[in-house]
Amino acid sequence: MRYLLPILGLLAAGTAMAQTPPAPGPWDPAGRMAAQREAMRALAFLDGHWRGPAEAPNSGPLVQTERVGTMLDGTVRVVEGRGYDPSGRTVFNALGVISYDPVRRTYSMHANASGYGGNFPLEVRPDGFSWSQPAGPGATIRYTATVRDGEWHEVGERIAEGTPPVRMIEMRLRRIGDSNWPGDGSVPPR
């Protein structure tokens, strides 16, 4: 009996390893890039140009646009968002780079907006994504996006301990077209 538990443990570990493909090693760039490209396919539904109404309590009604595409041979996805006031003036501009770590098997969003930036965990779902960023002691801002049938619905909420969530932004965008951005904007060698 005392040998049965270690043997069962080895069998379980072997079964788990057989079901999960091994992560590429740290010195395997081709393997890492292949895993990253595969992971980015899960977010291909975001690619293109998007536009629609957004509402933010501090800025009133906006027209929000997003443009999304891949870079670095499809290993990262780049997202640029712009919010326009009713006169057409840009009042918000953000840039996000979504990446995948094939060793840790995790996605992250490097986001920059309004003078702030950082790396944040990102969860990918079949119909969207979510990510959060710190917003002061005991608080976060969580962004949850659902994308289906050509509509991108996203809500940003400030969540603080002991209080109900406070909506920071909500946007409903329609996909308005394809885009080669940012891949078609490189500088040629000559």
Image: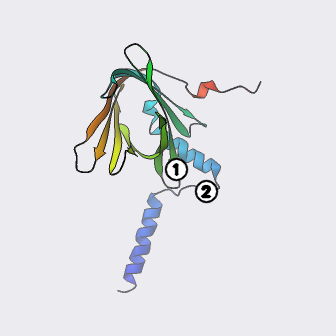
- Left or right of 61 on screen, residue 102: right
> Can you give x and y, in whole percent of width and height, for residue 158 in the image?
31, 41
Disc assigned to residue 101: 1
Q: Please, is residue 83 above or below residue 41 in the view?
A: above
- The residue lying at 47 percent from left, 63 percent from top is 17
- Vertically, is 149 above or below 25? above
Q: Earlier in the sequence, mark 2 or mark 1?
A: 2
Foreground pick, 4 / 64 = 64
For mark 2, what is the residue? 26
Can residue 125 be spotted in the picture? no
Q: Nearer the viewer, residue 48 or 120?
A: 120
Q: In the image, what residue type sits under mark 1?
A: Asp
Identify the amino acid type marked 2: Pro
- Element at badge 2? loop
Name which residue lies at 43% across and 32% down. Answer: 45
Q: Is residue 60 visible?
A: yes
- In this rendering, position of residue 139 left or right of residue 120: left
Return the x and y of residue 2 as percentages of the image width and height. 37, 86
Q: Residue furthest right?
A: 190
* Closer to us: 56 or 12: 56
Residue drawn at point x = 35 percent, y = 39 percent: 143
How crowded pointer 1 is (Cα within 10 Å; few <14, some 14-19, many 20+) is rated as: some
Q: How many marks?
A: 2
Circle 1: element type: strand
